[in-house]
Amino acid sequence: MDYAFKIERLEKKYSDFKLGPLDLDLEPGMVMGYIGPNGSGKTTTLLCMMQLIKANSGSIKIFGTENAPNNTSWKFDIGYVSDSPVFYENWNGEKNLKFLSQFYPNWSDDYAMALAKRFNIDLTKKAKDLSRGNRVKLSLISALSHKPKLLLLDEPTSGLDPVVRAEVLDTLFEVVETGERSIFYSTHILSDISRLADDLAFLKDGKLLFKTAKDDLIEKWRKISFKYNGELRVKNLVSKKNEGNDYQIITSDFSDTIEKLTELEVENLNEHRMSIDEIAVEVLKG
Amino acid sequence: MFLNLTDFSDEPLQSQISRQIRAKVLNGEVDAGTMLPSIRKLARDQHVSVITVQRAYEALEREGLISSRRGKGFFVNEIRDKRKKEMSIEKLIDKIRPLLKVAKEEGLSIEDIFAVIKKVLESK
Amino acid sequence: MWCLVKSEYEYNLKRIPILLILFPVIYYLKLAELEIFFYNLGIFYIIFLTMMFLVSFKNKELRERTFNTLPVKRIDIAISRLITVLLPLIYYTIIMVLFEVSISKFDPDLNFVVISFSLSVISFALYLIMRDTSLRLVREKGITKNNMKTTLVFAILILNILAVILVFLTKEGLEIPLNEISDFLKMINPFKGEYTELRLIITAIILSLVSLTTYTKGKFHME
């Protein structure tokens, strides 16, 4: 099976930062949320994938094809939204889109216009006169109009008002519906991907902490409070707090922990699930 | 298919989906033989991830409420009314057990608990 | 590749007619040998040519970032930036040849035309190579409206320093007309005669090809 993308042993060194070695892949038809604090290497990863920067070592394959800089047919399958899009600033949106359409055989003007309408953007305005949010919208339309099989999105909803953000997310749900298109979504606005993502990958200081199915994460992490006399000795807890006999713990392996707690016969056990936001904070805290 | 999903419940989305579909099947709102929306369609309509719906459907399949036919989709199974009642009762027992435990811990007697049940049902 | 060239021209459409008209005027003035300040207009028009290319394709560096995300080969982007500049240069060369041929029918100074063409290409190719290989400042900001003045002053400063050196060597007056530079170059050149122009043309071609290599093999755009 051709992965939508397959990153193997990717390494990129800067003077004060190193990304990798990174191994990551995405199955076709899936959505992966790429989560990490600023400066963790998310954008660097995307830039390497787009060959906008050259990695020191490792390989990246897009639908089975190596992402070579001089054989660019793999780019037909990719729609890329960067965190700071650039346009022909003195041209309006329509002309910018027309320019881009020349490069993609699968470009659909109808689809581009439909998206423009949905996102409520004025294509007759010059690019330099557009607000940040509108520039992001234009960038999204540019990335979606050739119906690429893989979307690489770098913070696509930052700067968007709630109504447009909802339209964008709705469009992304629509994109995934056919099962032929995949999304790799780098963000730190977790509420975006809390519903959309199938898988989550956590990046910190250039290293992949882990990759997991989102639903597994939600299932396995719990916040548990209980009463217990004495020193609590349970292994593998994410965090532990107590005031006297009142304990509050966070675990990443609920079934295992609940077993141990039952053995210890703790009292007044209260557990509940955590949101992706809460889990991410704990994961990235380290 | 009309589902009412929320991020504000402690119940994960996957579970909300399967619970709501189960309810519709058990109370007869959805007939046997009805085809459920495809996984991807439901994911798109409800704004949830594909895997979430997939797991919800798999859970319902394991319970015997629905079955998948290759290439066609997921269909609601024929369940005898007696079996429906049994399933509902099983589910209720599962849900109510922890609540009763807490009630007992807090010192309520069996009579107290029955009174509460009667009150709650009558007020609805 | 031609899409990129075409879009750059479409984008700068407003500036181009002015340049197309202005050039013959300036060249005529040069031939008429009007003296402005100390310098013969000749030197200005060289600066004019080069700076004009760089300035008219404003903020190109930023747009090249977008080109890099497109399914276009890097070599095509490198070629397109050369061609974008070569097209007006060829126009200028034709104008110059027409002027020279019509004014001095028996002895058209085509050497001068070749030298101007080559020097323009060389200076632009050097700019591209410099940009591709190192100067982070140039790479990030490029030549924009804001630093155009600085760049122009910088360029004139360098040319003036060169002029002073030449003055010292040739002990001539303070003007450095292009003819005298080429004469001087011919003078110190052991292979006298036409080879100066040939060398300049070859250098121009070589440096253009080098700029293609520095772009495709060099640091990628977002470094």
Image: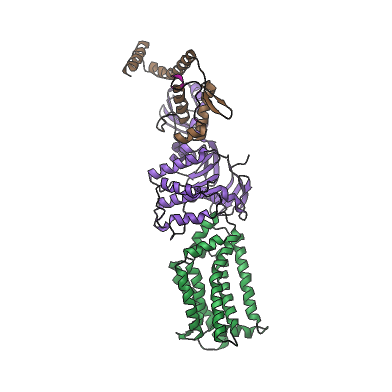
Chain colours: A purple, B brown, C green
Question: Which span of residues is magenta-colored?
Answer: B25-37
Q: Residue at position x 55%, y 56% from top?
A: C68
In x, y percent, where is residue C97? 57, 80
Can I make out residue A252 in this image? no
In x, y percent, where is residue C4? 54, 61
Residue C12 sits above or below residue A171 on the image: below
Tell me if A193 is positioned left or right of C191 in this view.
left
Report the front residue among A220 and C15. Answer: C15
Can I make out residue C108 in this image? yes
Query: Does the magenta segment cover residue A22?
Result: no
Query: Does the magenta segment cover residue B29?
Result: yes
Residue A32 sits above or below residue B104 on the image: below
Residue A241 sits above or below residue C35 on the image: above
Residue C215 sits above or below residue A13 on the image: below
Which residue of the protein is positioned furthest toward the right in this rendering? Answer: C191
In x, y percent, where is residue C189? 65, 83
Which residue of the protein is positioned furthest toward the top in this rendering? Answer: B111
Q: Quadrant of the C terminus of chain B?
A: top left
